[in-house]
Image (cartoon, rainbow, N blue to C red):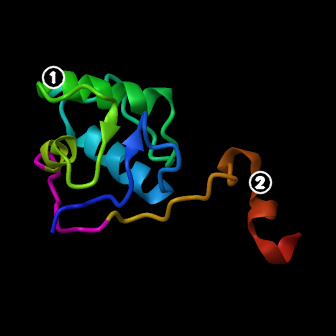
Amino acid sequence: MPKTIRSTVGRAGLRSAVEDVVIVQYLLNCVPKEQGGPLKELRLDGIAGAETLAAITRFQEAAHALVDGCVVPNGLTLTLLQRFDPLPSQALPFVVPRAQYNPKELSVDKSVPWRR
């Protein structure tokens, strides 16, 4: 079963779920640059920031899809992105950090609760 999303990701997705944004970022990274993939690999951070929005638009332009900057559940852009996934039936093998979590701010001692 292909990776899917439950909420809109992109310009209209004001409250996109972190997991949905990560799936879209992952799928965009699967697209070769020559076919509309991001110019620079996207960080899978769950934040639909400027780079993610630009990558969505770039892909839609290259795919000759409606360029609205949105990836909608069960929509054309998502369907087109899913075709590039080399492992469509495999779940993403990582845990998405919460938006408040910034790994750059943590030292080893702070990341281990019993050392605080």
Identified by mark 2, the residue type is Ser
Residue 87 painted magenta: yes
Q: Which sits earlier in the primary sequence, circle 2 or circle 1? A: 1
Mark 1 surroundings: few (<14), some (14-19) or many (≥20) residues within 10 A: some
Front residue of 89/60: it is 60
Pinpoint residue 74: horizontal percent, then vertical percent.
20, 55
Residue that appears at 17% across and 60% down: 87
The magenta-colored residue range is 83-91
Q: Secondary structure at mark 1?
A: helix
- Direction bottom: furthest residue: 114
Q: Report which quarter residue 68 is drawn in.
A: top left
Q: Secondary structure at mark 2?
A: loop
Q: Which mark is residue 11?
A: none
Pinpoint residue 78: horizontal percent, then vertical percent.
21, 47
108 on left or right of 69:
right
Q: Main secondary structure of the magenta part?
A: loop
Residue that appears at 34% across and 30% down: 69
In the rendered image, the vertical position of residue 38 relative to residue 19, given as above or below? above
Q: Quadrant of the C terminus?
A: bottom right
Q: Quadrant of the N terminus?
A: bottom left
In the rendered image, the vertical position of residue 8 relative to residue 69, given as above or below? below
Pinpoint residue 4: horizontal percent, then vertical percent.
26, 60
Residue that appears at 32% across and 22% down: 39
Mark 2 surroundings: few (<14), some (14-19) or many (≥20) residues within 10 A: few
Identified by mark 1, the residue type is Ala
Which residue in the structure is indicated by mark 1? 62
Which residue in the structure is indicated by mark 2? 107
The answer for how far apart the CA atoms under marks 2 and 1 are is: 42 Å
